[in-house]
Image (cartoon, rainbow, N blue to C red):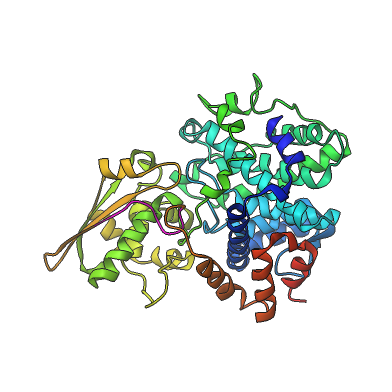
Amino acid sequence: MALAAFAACFDAKTLPGEVRGKLGWLLLDHLRVCSIGARMPWSDWSRAYTALTAKSGKSHVLFSPETLNPQHATFMNVTFGSSFDGDDTHVGAMLHPGVAVWSAALATAEHVGASGPEVLAAVTAGYETIIRIGLAVQPSHFKRGFQSTGTCDGFGTAAAAGRLLFRGKDASRRIAEAMGLAGGYAGGLAQFYYSGGSAKRIHAAHSAESGVAAALLAQQGYAGPVDIIEGQGGFARAYADGWNPALIESGLGERFHLMDVLVKSHAAAARVAAAIDGMLALRQEHGFSGDDIASMALGIPRIIQGRLTNPHPVDLQAAQMCLPFSVALASKIALAKGKIPTVAVMDYETGLGDRSLFEIEERTTIDLDAEVEAASNELSTAARVSVTLRDGRKLSKLVPAPKGSPSQPFTAEEHEARFTQELSGRVSEKVCAEIVAMSRNLDRLDPLWLGRALSGA
């Protein structure tokens, strides 16, 4: 009930300035990754699916004049943002919270006509709910075979949507009942790490829409168990071998875990980003390419051994989760002077047809590294990249944390530039500037205006 009470009663006016600033950057990043993802082929699959299943409503599908009910608008927009692994991540909770929370809050806000401060409160509640539940059940949850984006996001979207749907003295209980319903939808099996498939591309979308659906069902009278997390047959005991309930309530409303969210540079698993950065940094410093590598050694922490270190990915999704392939790919992409180097999903698509990358993998060793282990924590995962070049040079780079992590964050200027660079292909310079200004003062956030401004109308 503590999370539900927080969602119902939290006053956005009490948010510290640094938290507001971070949320503004996270909104820009959310819209940026949704814009990229909306062009991907699997987004067309979701468009075809919702054409069969969805009812129209007031909530915008991003970058389209189409409006759907809040559940299916959430599904579509989360598909855009989460489907190519570019969206924000909490490393310790091992999940992607932002794309679910922003999509659900904006869609539900349009549905009920909510204001900027209410959206800000809902988004904050959603982030904190997802991250705190994820932290409480990790790492046991991960080791049992779950991808926590698919299991935890629904709790947060139920909290966010519930904040906007429910008013009055019983709002806390009704949000708790919505979260109880959402717990029954928790899924997210992680077999894709081993055998590929495209299921992960809609894990977040399915979980997020389930949370919104749970809130809408609760509004009609359904009620889930209010002790869905801690109960004898609840989420924590069913989905983990051990959990820490104190992490859910500790500092709630004072300590904001959303400040620890990582914003990605690359379309890859967050825990391989430091190694990608290491390879790119070595190339920028020493001027070589993948064809010059005689052998490669990767130093890793224990947490990524296994699921993320299996070579020779079977498909695009598996490639994005694969450490040796990702680093081999980073050794061959073009580097643009003066720009933050990025490994994009299109690079992975092209790389799967490049047999020389598999040959680099064959010449790669992966070992546990004590210094890398010591540098890794719930905020980011470190890596060491070492190469021996064909000319005899031996080069090595320890990356304690990747770009975009809490200790190596993007600046405000970088966030705004990345947003504008992507969105300028969709909307006018004036609209881009207005959204950036809105991100600097989220009390001005107008969900209806934003949906229309991005619709292309």
| 15 vs 406, nearest the viewer | 15
Helix, strand or loop: magenta stretch: loop
Is residue 89 in view from this perspective? yes
Residue farthest to the top, as pictured: 232
Location of residue 88 (image quadrant): bottom right
Give the residues in magenta.
397-405
**Is residue 204 covered in magenta?**
no
**Is residue 403 covered in magenta?**
yes
Looking at the picture, how far across and down is residue 437, in whole percent?
66, 70
Horizontal side of 417 relative to 329 (left or right) equals right
Looking at the picture, how far across and down is residue 323, in whole percent?
36, 52
| 351 vs 10, nearest the viewer | 10
Location of residue 22 (image quadrant): bottom right
Looking at the picture, how far across and down is residue 426, in whole percent?
65, 76
Check the picture and name the quadrant holding the C terminus: bottom right
Q: Name above or below for residue 307 compared with residue 279.
A: above
Horizontal side of 131 relative to 434 (left or right) equals left
Q: Residue at x 48, y 30 (%)?
A: 140
| 356 vs 185, nearest the viewer | 185
Q: Residue at x 39, y 77 (%)?
A: 338
